[in-house]
Amino acid sequence: MRLYVYVLEARGLPAPRQRRGGVVLFYAKVTVGKQRFRTRAVEASDLGGAAVAAAWNEEFVFAVGSDGAAGGEELEVAVARRGARGREVVGTVRLPVPAATAAAGAPGERRSVPPTWFTLQLQRRRKGVVGVDGGDEAAADCGKILLSFSLYGENNVNSVVHTDAEVERSLDMEHSSCNNGGVVDSPRSHDTDNSEHFTQEDCNSITEVDDLAETSTTATANGASDTERMVPDAAASFFEEAMEIMKSRRSTPELPQDLDGGIIFEHAYLVGSKELNHLLFRPDSQFFKDVRELQGTMDYEEQPWTWKSADPPSLTRTCRYTTGASNKFMKAVKTSEEQTYLRADGKSFVVTARVRTPEVPFGNCFAVVLLYKIVHRTGEEGAHLTVSYNVDFLQSTMMRSVIEGSVRDGLRENFQGFAQVLSRHVVEVAGSVGMSKEQLLAPLQVEHRQSDIRLAYRYFCNFTAVSTVLFALYVLVHIFLSGPAGLEFSGLDLPDSFGELITAGVLVLQLQRLLNMVTHFVEARLQRGSDHGVKANGDGWLLTVALLEATSLPPGSVDPYVVLSCNGITRTSSVQLQTLEPQWNEIMEFGAMEEAPAVLDVEVFNFVGPFGVAISIGHAEINFLKHTSVELADIWVPLQGKLAQTCKSRLHLRVFLENTKGPETTMREYMSKMEKEVGKKLHVRSPHRNSTFQKLFNLPQEEFLIADYACSLRRKLPLQGRLFVSARIVGFYANLFGHKTKFFFLWEDVEEIQVLQPSFTTVGTPSLLFILKSGRGLDAKSGAKSQDKEGRLKFQFHSFASFSKASRTIIGLWKSKSSAVEQREEHHEEDASSLDLD
C-alpha cells in the first residue's frame, strides 16, 4: 500500500525570541516506521501577538503494510524550528496508519482524510537539551498543523508512475532542503521498495473512505482516532471543506483576465455566486448529468477533488468521458478534462479547465483551455458567469487556423446546450448578456476627454523639447540684459565671439527640430478628419466601435492610426505618436444603415508626416456572421500582413451592432424592397425554419432566410444538396451518407453571376455560376469548382427544380446588393469631396 501525506501549513506556532539580525526557519519532519522525509525550511509569517505561521504545501509518499519497509504502523509529524543557536521541536502529532489487511482486501480502494487541522503536542524533552529561546515551554501552546492523507490499496490498477520530470522535481526539492542546512533522510538510503516514494496514484476509484483520524484539542501526544468508510456524500463534504479553506486564505489572487480566444458564454443568473459554483462543480453534479444526457456523452468518469502541490495548493480533479458520435459514420472521441480552482473567496470563483482530445485530427498538437468566472453582481442580486477560451498549441502546425475555427464552432455548439440546461436549474436575468453597451463604453468616454492633453505631454516631454525651451529662454534673458557693443546698434545684435556664433547655430538647429515636432503633432491631430467623433443617428442598423489598443506592432511603426470601413462608410482614429503599444480608447460610431452590415474592415497605418504617404502596417476583417454579440463586445483581432504576422500584431476592439427598428419590422421592410427588385412575391419564412437555418450555419438571430432550393453542386462529382439564400449570405449544405458539406459566402464578395446553358456535365439542365472577387470567400474554397489565374473562386449550381424561379430571385438579390454597395461608395466619395472643398 501507499500512503500519501500532504503537509500544507501550520498556524499558532510559538514565536521565538531571537537576537537582532537572526533568522528562525520552520520545517516539518514526517516519519512512518523507518521512512523519514522533511519539508524545506521556511521563514515564518507573523500572525500578531506571540504566534507565527508557516506554509510548506509539500507531498510525501510512503510504502506501508506487509509489502513496504514499515517499521511500525504509526505516522508522526513533527514541526521544528532552527535558529542561530540550535534546533528545537515545537510540537508533534501522532496518528495510526490503518491495518494493512483492510486495504489489501479491497484492491483499488482509497482511504482519505480531507485537509484537517491537528493540534500539535509538546514532545517530551531530554535532559540538557535547550531550545532556541533558552527557556522552558512546558505549558506553551504548540499551535496546529493542516494535514491531508490518502491511502491506496496495493492492487490499484489506476496507478501511474511518475515521469522523469517529476522524479527530478522531487530530487530537486530534497537538494534544496539540504542547502537550507537541514539533514534529510533520503529515500535512497533505504531498500528498493522505498522507490515507490516517486509514484503517484491517478485514482479513478468510485469507493471513497471517511476521515481516518482527527485529533481534538484535548488529545494526548499518542492520541489516535479510528478509521471508517466514507459515506456516499463524503466527497461533497470534502468539497465544502476545501471551499472554506480557500476562502480563509489570507492572500487571494486577483481575478484573471479573459483568455485571448474570446468570450464564448456570458450570462447573469438570479442565484448567489456560491450556489452557482456548487451547481456547476460540486461532485456528482446533477447539472452536468443533464448536459451529458443532452450531448450524448458516454463512459463518464469523474475523479474526486484533491489538493495539488503548489504554492498555494490548488484544488483539482480530472474528468474523462467519450463524446457521442453525431452519426454512425463518425466515431466517438475520448476526452480528458483537468479542472483546477484558481480562486474561491466566497463571492467570486475562478476555475480553469484544460481539455485534451488526442483522437481527433491533429489532436496531439493542441489543447483547449477554458476559464470559468463566477462573480457576484455588485449592487445587484445574482451572479455573473463568464466562460472564455484559448487554444494552446503544443507544437507548430500549418493547420492552426483550421483548428482554431473548428474549436470555436464546436465550443459555440456545446455551450448552446450548456445554456439550455442551465436555464432549467436557475433563473436567468432578463436581458443579461454581459455588461451593457453603456457600461462598457462609459470609462472610455471619460478617458478620451483627456487624451489630447495626455498625448501632448507624452510627446513633448523629452530632452529635445525641454532643453530647447530652456536654452532659448536663457539666450533671451541674456539679450535683454546685455547692451550694444562694437558695431552693434539698437535692433541689431551681433555675436561677440566664435563661441557665441556656434551657440547661435546650435540654438537655430534645436528650434528647427522643435518646430518640426510641433508641426508633426498638429498634422497628426488633424489626420483624424471630419469623420472623427461623429455620432450615430437615424433608425436602422447602428454600429459602434470602441478602439482600445494595439500590441506588438512592427518596429518602425511609431505613429500608428486606424481606419475602419463598413458599408462604404469610413471612420479614422487619432494618431498615437512614438509608440509600438498604442492606446486609443476612442469611440467611433457609424450612422444608421438600412441593411445589416456583414463585414467591418480594419486597417492600421503608420503616419509618416504632412507630405509623406501613409504606410499600411496590417489589416483585418471582422465578419459579423461568424461572431456572437458577446464575442464582439471584447475581441482581439490579429492583423494580416507580412510584418504584422511576423510580429503577431493584434488590435483590441469592442464592437456593438444593434437594430433600432426591431427584427420583425426590418424583415418585412427588406422583403417588400426585394419584391420590387425581383418582381415576384417573397414569403416570410416561419420562425422554426429560420431557427433551423441559423443553427445550420451558426448565424446570429437577426439573419433571416429568404429562399432555399434543392440543387446540385458542380465539382468532380456532383453533390446533391440545398442552396440557401438570405439577406447577407449564399449558403450550401449537403449530407451524403454522414459526410457533411457546408459553406457560405457573402453577397458582397460576388463579382458576377452567369447563367450557363445546359450541357452533358450538368445533366442537361442550365446552371448558375457564381464568380467571387479576387481573394474573397476563401473559407468556402472547399466547395469551389475552380479558381482562375486572378485568384477568383467559381461555384456552379445546377439541377434546380425550377431554374427560372431560382435564377430570377438569386440574380435579382445580387443586383440589388451590388447596386446598393455602389451607391453607398459614390455617396461617401461625394461627401468626402464636398468636405475637402469646404
Image (cartoon, grey):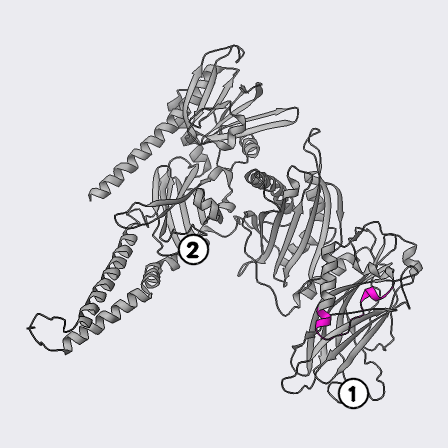
The local secondary structure at tag 1 comes to loop
Task: Locate the C terminus by quadrant.
Answer: top left
In terms of image quadrants, where is residue 736?
top right
**Residue 819 location (% of width, % of height):** 35, 28
Q: Position of residue 774 (x, y in %)?
A: 42, 29
Residue 225 part of the magenta segment:
no
Crowd class of label 1 (few under 14; some 14 to 19; many from 20; radius 10 Å): some
Q: Position of residue 379 (x, y in %)?
A: 53, 61
Residue named by callout 1: 130
Considering depth in this image, is 803 or 259 the residue closer to the camera? 259
- For label 2, the SS is loop
User: In the image, 479: left or right of 399?
Assistant: left
**Which residue: 61% across, 28% down?**
740
Say if the magenta span includes residue 184.
Answer: yes
The amino acid beneath tag 1 is Val
Q: Which residue is mark 2?
A: 581
Relative side of 525 to 200, left or right: left
Q: Is residue 796 above or below residue 620?
A: above
Count of labels in the image: 2
Q: Is residue 690 left or right of residue 153?
A: left
Q: Give the position of the N terminus as an image quadrant.
A: bottom right
Give the magenta range: 176-190
**Relative to residue 240, is residue 808 depicted above or below?**
above
Foreground: 706 or 601?
A: 601
